[in-house]
Amino acid sequence: AQTVTQSQPEMSVQEAETVTLSCTYDTSESDYYLFWYKQPPSRQMILVIRQEAYKQQNATENRFSVNFQKAAKSFSLKISDSQLGDAAMYFCAYRSYNNNDMRFGAGTRLTVKP
Amino acid sequence: DGGITQSPKYLFRKEGQNVTLSCEQNLNHDAMYWYRQDPGQGLRLIYYSQIVNDFQKGDIAEGYSVSREKKESFPLTVTSAQKNPTAFYLCASSFRPGLAGGSSYNEQFFGPGTRLTVL
């Protein structure tokens, strides 16, 4: 079974600065999807960004971008120009190509300091 | 507005009681899921259903039961056999892989969650 590891239980960043959250995964599959979800204090899970494994180009969504290193099985999230509203738990997730079984990491709690 | 609703937001259960958590979606998704979230452990899959009248156990199904009589609804019952039910429960839905109507990502959309506490 695939596993997802987030090695940073907590991270902090100064407002307007950049922060990178780490995620690694273990799989023997060649095709799959990767996601970053944000869970603010309201606990609503919100999709931040997604990446298909066969696409070499890193996904970008406004201030959020990923560094996808397929050979290293690494999928880090970079948040630029951090805002107070970015404070949340961030979960990395893996989904196999042919089924909807999604595996989540344990999460990283991001604090943004004003 | 399309979305996923869960009720109640907070639920208290006495020892030995069964309780049912509601999950409804109007996104026309085929697949629905139940996750349990404990502090420091991320989300763990309890049950999932790819189609009406069919569902499969996830990683931590013991002490839980589900039904899928309608496409829109996927209620979760926490039975008295679940020894440590205090947790935050999240319901999600998505399209099935390969079906028209969704992106190839088939990302899961989540409800607002139910906080269950055993008294």
Image (cartoon, grey):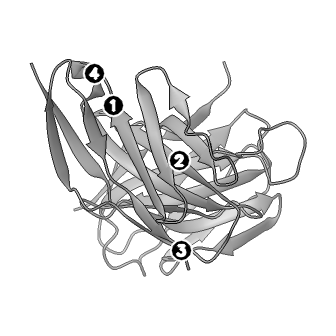
Chain of the residue on which disc 3 is drawn: A
Q: Is residue B102 above or below residue B44?
A: above
Earlier-in-chain disc, 4 versus 3: 3
* Label 4 to label 3: alpha-carbon separation: 31 Å
Chain of the residue on which disc 2 is drawn: A
Earlier-in-chain disc, 2 versus 3: 3
Is residue B60 left or right of B5 when viewed as pictured? left
Chain of the residue on which disc 1 is drawn: A
* Label 2 to label 4: alpha-carbon separation: 20 Å
* Label 2 to label 1: alpha-carbon separation: 14 Å
Q: Is residue A52 above or below residue A2?
A: above
Say if labels 2 and 1 share a chain: yes
For the C terminus of chain B, the quadrant is: bottom left
Can see residue B92?
yes
SS for callout 3: loop
Give x and y (percent) for residue B101. Answer: 86, 36
Residue under label 4, please give it: A85
